[in-house]
Amino acid sequence: MASLLTFTMQSDHSNLSKEVKKTIEDNYGNNIRIFKSIVNYSIKAAETSAVGESIFAYDPAGPIAKSYMSVVEELICNEK
């Protein structure tokens, strides 16, 4: 089985997020498959834990649900 990685809880405004992403890509990018789809940090995603629902039930049309669907679509497309 191939190793797969997707970045979650990313923040475009955080230097730490950018640095961690670059470090992982530089050190492991040739050994594992890194998804192009990224799931950014969102308060809505954190709220799902408090209410005990998935992001698809809590905010199905929101950007985080769409990001997770992009990850799923990318996985399915690459498995064919």
Image (cartoon, rainbow, N blue to C red):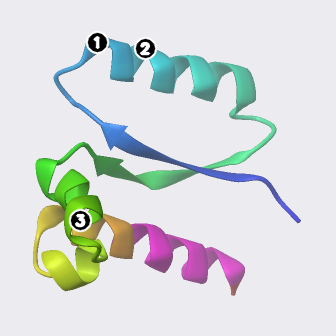
Whole-percent x, y for residue 67 in the image: 29, 64
- Kind of residue at disc 1: Asn
Pointer 1 residue: 15
Instruction: Check if mark 1's residue and mark 2's residue have beta carbons within 8 Å.
Output: yes
Q: CA distance from mark 3 to mark 2?
A: 27 Å
Q: CA distance from mark 1 to mark 2?
A: 6 Å
Q: Is residue 71 magenta?
A: yes
- Kind of residue at disc 3: Thr
Q: Main secondary structure of the magenta part?
A: helix
Q: Residue at x 40, y 46 (%)?
A: 8
Count neighbours of disc 3 (C-alpha within 10 A) and say few if under 14, some if 14 to 19, many if 20 or more.
some
Q: Residue at x 23, y 65 (%)?
A: 48
Residue 25, above or below 10? above
Whole-percent x, y for residue 11 in the image: 24, 32
Image quarter of the C terminus? bottom right
Q: Residue at x 10, y 79 (%)?
A: 61
Pointer 2 residue: 19
